[in-house]
Amino acid sequence: MKHREAKEVSRWLRRRPWFNKYKRNIIEEDESRLDYFLSGNAGMTTLSAAFMYSDTPEGIKYWGKREERFLRWYYYQGKEIFRCKWFTIQIGL
């Protein structure tokens, strides 16, 4: 399955309006892992493994939506697939 490179992931993250919240939550969870996640080296787990969603002020629903959008972007580069139910089923959302 086609996916993005670490450099692309890092650039994508830094352009999100919620980037500072993401970064703050990583620091609160385990600051030593900050560079790993911000560099994009975590790949498909860039959001899901960064911190426990339930332990954040934003909560599970907030980060779950961001993770879903991230995974859609991560695996598919074509815009036409973003609103497709098939995609959601394929990645188990």
Image (tube, grey):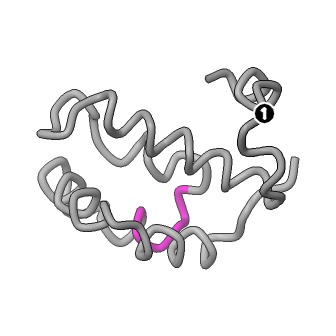
Q: Nearer the viewer, residue 16 or 38?
A: 16
Q: Which quadrant of the figure has residue 88?
A: top right
Q: Nearer the viewer, residue 40 or 54?
A: 54
Residue extending furthest right? 1
Q: What residue is pinned by disc 1?
A: 84
Please tell me how many numbered marks the rendered image carries: 1
Q: Position of residue 31 (x, y in %)?
A: 19, 62
- Which residues are drawn in magenta? 37-42
Is 81 located above or below residue 10 in the figure? above
Q: Which quadrant of the figure has residue 13?
A: bottom left
The C terminus, quarter of image: top right
Predominant SS of the magenta segment: loop
Judge from the rendering whether residue 4 lies leftward or rightward of residue 69; answer left or right.
right
Q: Position of residue 15 (x, y in %)?
A: 44, 75
Q: Position of residue 12 (x, y in %)?
A: 53, 71
Q: Secondary structure at mark 1?
A: loop
Q: Name which residue type carries label 1.
A: Cys
**Residue 36 falls inside the magenta stretch:** no
